[in-house]
Image (cartoon, rainbow, N blue to C red):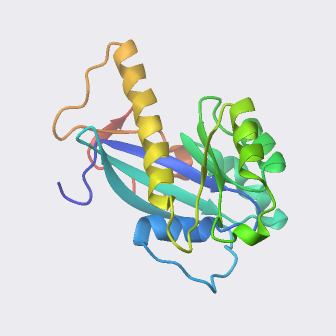
Amino acid sequence: MANDEYDFLFKVVLIGDSGVGKSNLLSRFTRNEFNLDSKSTIGVEFATRSIQVDNKTIKAQIWDTAGQERYRAITSAYYRGAVGALLVYDISKWLKELRDHADTNIVIMLVGNKSDLRHLRAVPTEEAKQFASENGLSFIETSALDASNVELAFQNELTEIYRIVSSKALDQGESAPGPGQGTSIPLSSSTPPGDASKKGQCC
């Protein structure tokens, strides 16, 4: 299958405060790169990567935004069309914003990044697990620096979205896409130029 062919296109957003490592999680997953000297994100950046789930090609369009307050005006467009989110600590403020702006069915994963800095841990694992459980979130600890659990975090998030989308299609009596029929999740006006589904219809 060529790079521009896929069965499903999912928009996933990375949210959290500045300096928690969102950009390095993105670059580690999409390019297997890590930059100790990475600068704060200005506005919005995105990258894509395709994975296989149940012999289907899922293209993830992963959006990374600046955590600084002065860029918060972009949030409504940023969340539009997102079917998944990785919420990277700080927890309290961002979960409310996600609930306020994103689709009610969005799949949220709580991500404790920088697990390599265990001696500087601010949030105990059990406390984070309990918070995730109480709020209906999945939870994982990652390190973009040493790459631990980064692949697993994105794989789990995209697989969960795929399972939900597939089961909804079955519930509605829709047939699964055949060869050459991609299904993209609506990305509304936030779709970057030139990256719309080349062969699918919105569901």
Percent across and percent down for residue 47 are 47, 64
**Residue visible at 50% across and 58% down in the picture:** 149
Figure check: 190 above or below 33: above
Position of residue 158 in the picture relative to residue 110 (left or right): left
Q: Quadrant of the C terminus?
A: top left
Q: Quadrant of the N terminus?
A: bottom left
Figure check: 148 above or below 191: below
Q: Is residue 194 visible to us here?
A: no
Percent across and percent down for residue 109 are 60, 44
**Residue pushed farthest bottom?**
37
**Residue visible at 83% across and 46% down in the picture:** 92
Q: Quadrant of residue 66?
A: bottom right
Percent across and percent down for residue 190 are 55, 51
User: Observer-nearest residue: 39 or 159?
Assistant: 159
Position of residue 74 in the picture relative to residue 61 (left or right): right
Q: Quadrant of residue 82?
A: top right
Position of residue 16 in the picture relative to residue 10 (left or right): right
Percent across and percent down for residue 46 are 52, 63
Q: Quadrant of residue 101?
A: top right
Position of residue 50 in the picture relative to residue 119 (left or right): left
**Residue visible at 70% across and 67% down in the picture:** 118
Q: Is residue 17 visible to us here?
A: yes
